[in-house]
Amino acid sequence: MDSDQVIKEILARFPISGEQVRVIPVKTGLIHTSYKVIERQGKSYLLQKINTSVFRDVEALMGNIAHVTTILKDAFQSSPYESLELLKTNDGQLFYEHEFKAWRIYHFKEHLVGYDAPENKEMVVEAGKAFAQFAKTLSQTDPEQLSVTLPDFHSLQKRYQQFKLALKNTPVKLSEIDPLPEQIAGFTQLLLPLEYAMDSGEIPIRITHNDSKFNNLLFDQTNKARCVVDLDTVMPGIIHFDVGDCLRTLTPSTPEDEPNLGKIELREDFHYAFLEGYIENESGWLTEEEIKFIPFSAPYMALIMGIRFLTDYLQGNIYYSCDHPEHNLVRAKCQIEVTRQFLEQFPLNSDLT
Ligand code: GN1
Ligand code: MG
């Protein structure tokens, strides 16, 4: 937790009535440090210290977020959806730099809530519709207008190379991670065609969210999906990254770090309900090739996550925040099992039309 003094100094740079605010640490993800700030009059904000070892170019990161939130706010004016909104500093900047750290503030969506897992099928359909609407709305903007803040973020080839290098240099005993390397090699071969289709231009590059976990979607009190949050990774990508990240988090009956692999099951009804919501809303904005490759999405993203968690474990847990030293290994085993089950249960060549 940052000191009260530091937080007070930061808040003084934003149009927030500095005195008598309450500041509560909140856990919002694995990357930044976040606080909820509540003003005496009742307005609340999300204050975040940006992880600048992950996002080295804060200017580009915040530029992307400002760009996208402006488009979404405008487009969603007469729709049930909402956009996140930044609170600029007193001198109109998108973030404030203090002792080599960067801080930003969003308006807090007090009337909405996020869930780690869906409570029923209706919420899953809602998730499909909401992420489709997000991508569809942004698909009218040239992706080149956004900066690539995390190059090759969802490149399976790059992630696999990084994993092989970590494997070579790690002090971890290979028996400890058995049979993951062999599974990873096999699944990578099966799923690379998605990346090749992106590289060859067969699948179009659009503006995508790239971290579309189910809990990055907020719902209202009637369980209608209203707002996509956590816009840090919004940049050029393919829709399969978003479809896949949401499916890998809502289809399994267990969280992304389930230690008991025997408990993991994929809920077929949730899987199809999400796709129904996503594709139903489609009305011609997706290409035939995009639809053809949709079955690759979920195993591709689960595999990427498994590889990244394992690579971080082999490198001594330097990237993700962890609750215990084996946490990344537990996450990796879970995500590789999820990949295996997706491949077993949902054929890559299934026809979704
Ligand atoms: C990170 O911090 P959070 O939870 O939003 C990560 C995602 C992973 C996710 C795994 C910038 O996101 O790619 O899917 O953890 N974000 C970054 O839960 O690396
Ligand atoms: Mg995130």
Image (cartoon, helix red, strand yellow):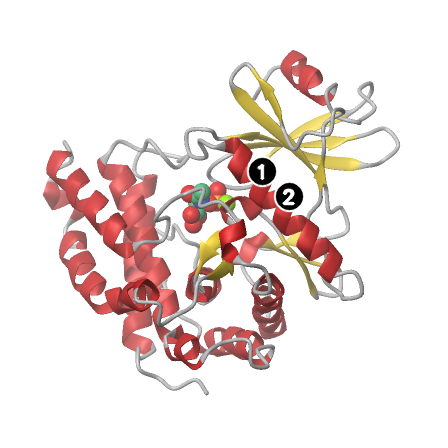
Image quadrant, ligand 1? top left
Q: Quadrant of the N terminus?
A: top right
* Residue 279: mark: none
Is the CB of the residue bearing disc 2 within 8 angstroms of ligand 2?
A: no
Residue 152 lies left or right of residue 165; in this view the side is right
In the rendered view, tell whether residue 344 sits above or below residue 6. below
Residue matched to label 2: 66
Q: Indicate which disc residue 62 carries.
A: 1
Question: Where, by quadrant of the figure, is residue 238 drawn?
Answer: bottom left
Which element carries disc 1, helix, strand or loop?
helix
Query: Could you classify mark 2 by the number of other residues whose Cα lies within 10 Å: few (under 14), some (14-19), or many (20 or more)?
Result: some
Looking at the image, can residue 194 be seen? Answer: yes
- Residue 90 in the image: state x and y as whole percent: 76, 25
Q: From the viewer's perspective, is residue 275 above or below residue 259?
A: below
- Please give the name of the residue rendered at 42% of the width and 61% of the height, measured from the top-left corner: 241
SS for callout 2: helix
Indicate the amino acid at tag 1: Met
Q: As drawn, is 156 to the left or to the right of 123? A: left
* Residue 87 falls in image quadrant: top right
User: Residue visible at 31% across and 67% down?
Assistant: 194
- 328 left or right, relative to 204: left
Instruction: Give how far across and how far down residue 48 sits, in percent.
Output: 60, 32
Give the x, y percent position of residue 18: 80, 20
Q: Is residue 222 above or below residue 218?
A: below
